[in-house]
Image: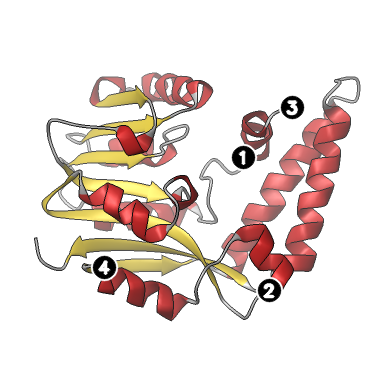
Amino acid sequence: MNREQISAIAHAEHPIKSPLDDDSVRRLLERGVPRGDERVLDLGCGGGEWLLRALVMGPKLHAEGVDISVDDLAQAREAASRLGVGERLVLHHQEAEGFVSSQPFDLVLSVGAAHAFGGLLPTLAAARKHLAPGGRVLIGDGFWDRDPSEEAVEMLGDFADLATTVDRVVADGWTPVDGHVSTRRELDDYEWACWGSLASWALDHPADPDSAQALETATTRRSEWLRVYRDTWGFVSLVLRRTSD
């Protein structure tokens, strides 16, 4: 069982692949696409969860997503057809860093995908290339809520605290116009859902050759969360505009 298969099972009960609940996602999208007729791009769209919600919210909105996962893109197309928004969604199977469009976008999304670009600021640099004048970026990434252990840093990465994270974004030429810090409930619900879904799949498929690996992975990841980073790691989502276009 590869990483993509594990992720698909783990997110079965929590389709937003970040610690955000439905109300938080809706409010952030409302701030990102206030008119409802914007052009939206998701760099690392996965199964298109953010784009699909935006399309349902804005009946005149046009969305495009970029991702390297064939399975995720197929899932996005199927969901878009089921929701009746397929004609307004374009999906690109390629690396997000190399994506080129002939038209800019009013909102560029990248939530929980900063690792693919090498960090928060490189992700913003990638988003900037596609942003229309006056447009907005919706980005989500981790931060350290308290001083982490060396094990936590080795496991999750070298994040900064929340204030420093925002300061770095501002120094890079962006102004936050809204944001959301995931609550303890959102953070915990996300972890319980992910590793609970994976464990349940393993228990429901005892004869599957991947069952033992799935259960072991769920057990290990749950333990890492509870013992290593639960009390120190946080997640922030920011709606940003260029300070000077």
Does residue 155 show up? yes
Which label lies toward us, 2 or 3?
3
**Residue at coordinates 56% horizontally, 68% vertically from top-left?**
234
Between 60 and 229, the one lying in front of the other is 229
- Say which label, 1 or 4, has the lower sequence index: 1
Q: Is residue 59 above or below residue 187?
A: above
Type of residue at label 1? His
- Label 2, on which residue? 231
Please provide percent x and percent y for residue 160.
Answer: 50, 73
- Label 3, on which residue? 1
Which label lies toward us, 4 or 2?
4
Task: Give the structural element (helix, strand or loop) at label 2.
Answer: loop
- Say which label, 2 or 1, has the lower sequence index: 1
Please provide percent x and percent y for residue 49.
Answer: 43, 38
- Say which label, 4 or 2, has the lower sequence index: 4
Please provide percent x and percent y for residue 145.
Answer: 57, 76
Q: Quadrant of the C terminus?
A: bottom left
- Say which label, 3 or 1, has the lower sequence index: 3
Q: CA distance from mark 2 to mark 1?
A: 22 Å
- Label 4, on which residue? 172
- Say which label, 2 or 3, has the lower sequence index: 3
Please provide percent x and percent y for residue 217.
Answer: 80, 42
